[in-house]
Every structure is written in C-alpha cells, then in structure tokens.
C-alpha cells in the first residue's frame, strides 16, 4: 500500500512538471486530458475575489513580509559571501504551475496546502538565486491549473488570461513600490509564459530600468517573440537590458514533444515560430549559443531527500547551446526523480546553474550601474 501511494505521488508530480514542458500536448494526450482537464467550463470569478497586492498576504515573498522563514531569503550550504550593492535591484519572480486539481480552471490564492508548499519550494530553490542582487517580490496568483495546458480552447485561454491579469496587477504594485530601482525579472515554466507577455505589454515601463529578464523553461523565438518585447538576447556576460532563456536537456536529447507543439505556432505579430529561431542563452557563459565545460559551473543546487535543504556542488555540470537547446555534459548530480522523457531536465533548469545564475545577475547589475 505504501509503495502504491508513493508511485501515485510520483505520478502526480511528474504530471506537474510535464505541464511546464509542453510534453502533455502530444504524448499520451487523450489519457491526460481525461484525468487532468478541469471539470465544467471556465467561470469568471467575481472581481471582489481577486488579490489585493497592496496587502502582504497576497505575496509569497516581499521585503516587508516580515516572516522569519521567507523562502526567497534562503541560501544553500556553500554559498559565497554577498557582494553587496549600493543600489540593489528590485526582483520580480513568477513561480511555475503548482496546482494539480480538477475542480477549477485556476488555482486559489491560498488555502490549498500542497500547492502552497510547492509555491514556497520554487521560490526557495529558484528565486533565491537572486537574493544578493536585490529584494525579491514573488506574488501569489490564480495560476492556470495543470489541465489548462492540455487544451487550446476558450476555457484554457481564459484561465491563462486570468492568471496573467493577477501577475500584471502584482507587477503594477511592484513598480509602484520600487519607482527608481533597477529591475530584474525572472520566471519559470508557466511563470516564464506570463513573463514573456509582461515584457511585451509593459516594455515602456521598463525602459532604462531592466537589468535582465530570465525567461526560463519556456521556448522563446528570436524572430517571433523578441521583436515584440523590444529586447535583445544577451550576447555578452556584461550586458544589461537583455533576455536569457534556456531549456536543459541531457544527452542524447529528444525534444520532439516540445517541438511538435511549439513549431508553427504564431507570435504576437503573426510570425511563425521555427526551431532554427529558438533562443538559447547559456547561463554558464551569459551568451547566446555559448558553451562551457563543467569547471565553469560554480555550483549546482543538489537538494536533500525532503527538498528542504540543499548544497552547492561546483564543477559538475557543463553545457552548450545546440540548435536551441541547452545540452548538458559532465557528471550530473542526483537531483531527483523528475527527469522527463527525452532527457528533459526542465524541472532543474535553475538548480543545475544556481550559482552561475547568481553570478550572472550580479554581473549584469554591475553593468547596468556603469
């Protein structure tokens, strides 16, 4: 009985992470649709039930949250001493999908214990990489449920739009509270999808203030997406005002599940997305289409058994950009059981390069100040 429960738990978690990697669109689609699509049709909630981002309760993390165990303040064993900046950045981070239920198209803001635990876990393991560069703001939002990624219908679109409306409202509050600070933006999976839209729609508000945008675990086209954002891909480790994006794969890599769903879709201006245009910025080099050996990696975040703690292991994982993918090499540590089909390390996009991402953000902040 215990073994069965464990397998069910693992299955559910795998579904969560597959959602962020697009695999669910093409592989086992009918089974997944049956077992994960929310019941009924999308019902717009009353406006009064939405989050009020002026209240600290609407945030997982923000500087004045005043909680002793703020997940964004966490640092793994082996973290280098803080660099310290006279003018730190304001960091806006959007977490990935954590709501797995079928009872609604959008997850609740609070009250769902498993989802809240995962929210905090992602803030701790991903957003924490930026906590030396500046103060982190991580909103709760009515995320689109896992099943919303299974269909391209009106219900799914409305669920994603609702989630984005919360993210946009949180971003407005974030900018209002940080009117002059340099800005770092980061997201993963569903969070990266919302971030890519935010970059398109709020480009004017970020002009001259953006240190870098980390749009990780969601494919970005240099032809169909970047022009609409008005941002270049990062081509130098000392460049600011640019965008980084990568998708981590072991070798041999098989990205067909992603490519079959992504290629041929259209960007905001109607340009088709093609494999040859998929962006890869290597977090080890800070450059588009870069390559680096394992010794260049200052620390992969390796979690404890219960994922509550972690230690940095340096010099283990190298990476090179190849045809839009970030291909891993070296001695990949045991990160957990959630490597997806095709050697897809989507779940660990940040963990694999936790210390390099930290260094990258600090370099770009220093460059922005210059």
Image (cartoon, rainbow, N blue to C red):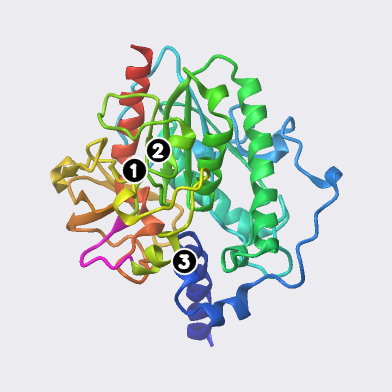
| Residue appearing at x 55%, y 14% in the figure | 180
Task: Assign a secondary structure to mark 1.
Answer: helix
Magenta segment: 248-255
What percent of the width, then of the height, locates residue 287?
25, 36
Q: Residue 252: within the magenta?
A: yes
Q: Which mark is residue 18?
A: 3
User: In what quadrant of the picture does the N terminus appear?
Assistant: bottom right
**Front one among 187 and 280:** 280
Q: Residues within 10 Å of mark 3 (few under 14, many from 20)?
A: many
- Residue plotted at (34% across, 68% down): 256
Q: CA distance from mark 1 to mark 2?
A: 6 Å
Left or right of 159 on screen, residue 264: left
**Image quadrant occupied by the C terminus:** top left
Marks 2 and 1: in contact by CB < 8 Å?
A: yes
In the image, residue 204 lies at what x, y percent?
A: 55, 23
Q: Main secondary structure of the magenta part?
A: loop
The kind of secondary structure element at disc 2 is: helix
Residue under label 1, please give it.
354
- Is residue 70 highlighted in magenta? no
Q: Which residue is mark 2?
A: 129
Of the image marks 3 and 1, the number of the one nearer the N terminus: 3
């Amino acid at each position: 009985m215990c073994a069965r429960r464990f397998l069910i738990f693992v299955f559910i978690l795998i579904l969560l992470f597959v959602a962020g990697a697009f695999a669910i669109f093409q592989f086992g689609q009918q089974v997944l649709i049956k077992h994960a699509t929310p019941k009924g049709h999308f019902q717009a909630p009353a406006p009064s039930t939405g989050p009020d981002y002026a209240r600290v309760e609407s945030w997982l993390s923000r500087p004045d949250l005043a909680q002793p165990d703020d997940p964004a303040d966490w640092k793994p064993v082996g973290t280098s001493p803080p660099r310290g900046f006279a003018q730190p950045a304001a960091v806006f981070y959007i977490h990935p999908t954590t709501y797995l239920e079928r009872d609604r198209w959008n997850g609740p803001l609070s009250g769902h214990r498993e989802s809240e635990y995962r929210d905090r876990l992602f803030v701790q393991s991903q957003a924490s990489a930026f906590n030396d560069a500046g103060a982190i703001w991580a909103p709760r939002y009515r995320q689109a449920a896992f099943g919303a990624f299974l269909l391209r219908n009106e219900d799914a679109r409305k669920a994603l739009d609702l989630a984005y409306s919360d993210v946009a409202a949180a971003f407005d509050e974030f900018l209002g509270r940080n009117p002059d600070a340099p800005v770092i933006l980061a997201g993963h999976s569903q969070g990266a999808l919302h971030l890519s839209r935010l970059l398109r729609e709020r480009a004017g508000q970020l002009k001259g203030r953006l240190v870098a945008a980390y749009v990780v675990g969601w494919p970005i086209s240099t032809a169909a997406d970047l022009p609409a954002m008005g941002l270049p891909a990062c081509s130098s480790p000392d460049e600011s005002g640019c965008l980084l994006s990568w998708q981590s794969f072991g070798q041999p890599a098989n990205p067909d599940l992603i490519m079959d769903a992504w290629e041929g879709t259209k960007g905001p201006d109607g340009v088709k997305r093609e494999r040859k245009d998929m962006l890869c910025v290597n977090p080890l080099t800070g450059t588009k289409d870069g390559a680096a050996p394992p010794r260049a990696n200052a620390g992969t975040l390796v979690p404890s058994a219960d994922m509550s703690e972690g230690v940095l292991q340096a010099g283990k994982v190298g990476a090179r950009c190849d045809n839009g993918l970030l291909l891993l090499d070296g001695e990949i540590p045991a990160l957990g059981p959630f490597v997806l089909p095709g050697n897809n390390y989507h779940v660990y996009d940040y963990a694999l390069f936790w210390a390099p991402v930290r260094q990258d953000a600090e370099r770009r902040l220093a460059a922005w100040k210059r």
